């Protein structure tokens, strides 16, 4: 199989889409971060925090995250199966449909059309379009696997299969709804059942977008870009199966101390703690792959993205199970501590791994070296510093917030009212905004670097 027989246009298309939605999603993120300490900026419903927050989460989770995942999947699939995309026209249609869906999603959320279920806010016509798009994608994934010339199934392929199957099941089950008109529907489930299904979905949609396919990228791109074999295939497969087995039981850790039956909460806590093992199986595998070659952190600009990325994943997967424990969750739930948790994962682990994967793929498929390694290095430091400042500030703010909510006077009354706690967080929100600007500057350099590399290859 020669390089020329592979179809990389689709990979390039998704890379460009990912960068576009990343920039849009971050501009909205910066705006809502600014609104947090300038509430008067909620000028119209269209610019209100409530509407824009979902544009931010959907734009980045579904727009940037999924486009990055599709780009990497179409690349990895072809390489690991040694088979060109089986239905290239379908893949191209997938690219167009994806962008139309995300654009309509952004506009409809801006306009206030929302089911109000987190990460499942899209109204029913768009849900149907999402399912159609996913089927189109799955057809190519499974066709490649069936026709593959390489018998061995490397672990990244298992992660891709898990994502493809699980997201379909999650999305369909949680989005079963009764339409009232074209723009409004109500969930098929009610009360506690609705909450339980929603958070089974919510947790796993995060897991099967922000963890599973990102691990597929990590396992593929770390060895190929470092030139070092993976430390242990056996460990990678054990980690894979135990991660997949445990993940789906943990959704109720988002519903601690609620009317959801206590045993369901306890099962979720137990499996959340169990998850540390498979998560760290991948972290350790990554670290050991570099054994004796740690100088590559300096000599190969891609390696530091991957290693810092997996380190944030490692920290995230210790913080997650800990904050799911009942006593700690009673303190941290609803506070900015959780917002810090989210962004260490998204701005650290997810963005760093996707960045390095793009930096690896684009020069390969363009047949040109990266426009500037120096810019890539500056990008790395800006997103690292921006993310660390962002998340650490939110953790500290979150602790203060939780403590203020729970503080009582000797007569048992609350010491602070809710607004006191919000106003006391303004300095943290200002630092978070500044950190976001630093991070955003890094992302602009990233987009510029990729754009220039693609442009050079076109001329
Ligand atoms: C072992 C792995 C993990 C466990 C057990 C875990 C646990 C948790 C818990 C208990 C919460 C809810 C906190 C609360 O609202 O009180 C949470 C929230 C969240 N986590 Fe994790 N986490 C893990 C890894 C990750 C990773 C790798 C990401 C990737 C970015 C992530 C993204 C999120 C997001 C987006 C939320 C917010 C959900 C919402 O909208 O309420 N988590 N996590
Ligand atoms: C400049 C960088 C960023 C800024 C300024 C920013 C800002 C924000 C703000 C202000 C919130 C709402 C917090 C709240 O409700 O109190 C938020 C939530 C969220 N952001 Fe970001 N964000 C950034 C980067 C990202 C990235 C890169 C991703 C994903 C790839 C992301 C995904 C999310 C998610 C999933 C939530 C919901 C968290 C939850 O419900 O617990 N953000 N962001």
Image (cartoon, rainbow, N blue to C red):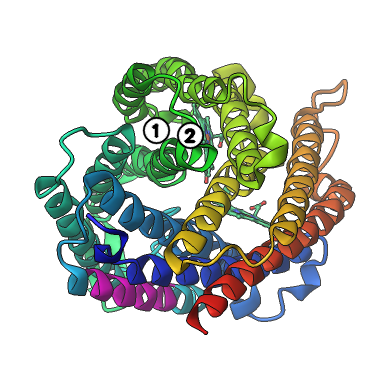
Chain part drawn in magenta:
91-105
**Is 342 above or below relative to 19?**
above
Q: Is residue 213 left or right of residue 241?
A: right
The numbered dot on residue 251 is 1
Q: Which residue is mark 2?
A: 254
Q: Are marks 1 and 2 in contact (CB under 8 Å)?
A: yes
The numbered dot on residue 449 is none
Q: Where is residue 368 drawn, in percent x and y?
A: 53, 67
Q: Where is residue 52 drawn, in percent x and y?
A: 59, 68
**Is 364 above or below relative to 278?**
below
Density class for disc 1 (Cα within 10 Å; few <14, some 14-19, many ≥20) is many
Density class for disc 2 (Cα within 10 Å; few <14, some 14-19, many ≥20) is many
**Is 112 above or below relative to 282?**
below
Which quadrant of the view contains residue 246? top left
- In this view, the residue in front, 300 or 355, is 300
Q: Where is residue 413 drawn, in percent x and y?
A: 80, 30
């Amino acid at each position: 199989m020669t390089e020329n027989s592979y179809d990389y246009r689709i990979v390039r298309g998704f890379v460009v889409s990912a960068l576009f939605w990343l920039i849009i999603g971050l501009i909205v993120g910066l705006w809502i971060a600014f609104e947090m300490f300038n509430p008067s900026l909620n000028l119209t419903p269209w610019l209100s925090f409530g509407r824009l927050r979902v544009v931010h989460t959907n734009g980045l989770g579904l727009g940037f995250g999924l486009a990055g995942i599709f780009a990497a999947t179409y690349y990895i699939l072809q390489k690991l199966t040694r088979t060109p995309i089986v239905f290239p026209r379908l893949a191209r249609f997938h690219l167009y449909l994806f962008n139309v869906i995300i654009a309509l999603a952004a506009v409809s959320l801006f306009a206030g059309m929302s089911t109000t279920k987190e990460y499942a806010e899209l109204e029913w016509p768009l849900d149907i379009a999402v399912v159609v798009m996913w089927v189109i994608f799955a057809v190519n994934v499974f066709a490649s696997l069936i026709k593959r010339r390489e018998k061995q199934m490397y672990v990244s392929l298992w992660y891709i299969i898990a994502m493809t199957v699980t997201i379909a099941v999650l999305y369909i089950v949680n989005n079963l709804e009764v339409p009232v008109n074209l723009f409004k529907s109500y969930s098929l489930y009610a009360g506690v059942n609705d909450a339980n299904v929603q958070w089974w979905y919510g947790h796993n949609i995060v897991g099967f977008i922000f963890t599973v396919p990102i691990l597929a990228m990590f396992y593929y791109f770390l060895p190929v870009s470092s030139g070092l074999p993976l430390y242990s295939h056996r460990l990678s497969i054990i980690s894979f199966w135990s991660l997949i087995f445990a993940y789906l039981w943990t959704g109720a850790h988002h519903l601690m101390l609620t009317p959801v039956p206590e045993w369901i909460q306890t099962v979720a806590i137990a499996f959340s703690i169990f998850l540390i093992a498979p998560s760290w199986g991948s972290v350790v595998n990554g670290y050991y792959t570099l054994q004796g070659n740690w100088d590559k952190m300096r000599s190969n600009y891609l390696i530091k993205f991957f290693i810092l990325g997996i380190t944030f994943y490692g920290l995230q997967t210790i913080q997650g199970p800990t904050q799911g424990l009942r006593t700690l969750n009673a303190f941290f739930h609803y506070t900015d501590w959780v917002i810090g948790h989210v962004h260490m994962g998204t701005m650290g682990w997810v963005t760093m791994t996707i960045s390095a994967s793009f930096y690896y793929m684009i020069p390969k498929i363009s047949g040109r070296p990266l426009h500037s390694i120096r810019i890539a290095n500056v990008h790395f430091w800006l997103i690292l510093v921006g993310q660390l400042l962002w998340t650490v500030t939110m953790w500290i703010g979150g602790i203060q917030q939780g403590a203020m909510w729970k503080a009582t006077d000797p007569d048992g009354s609350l010491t602070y009212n809710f607004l006191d706690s919000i106003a006391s967080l303004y300095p943290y929100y200002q630092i978070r905004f500044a950190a976001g600007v630093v991070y955003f500057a890094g992302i602009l350099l990233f987009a510029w670097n990729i754009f220039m590399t693609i442009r050079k290859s076109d001329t």
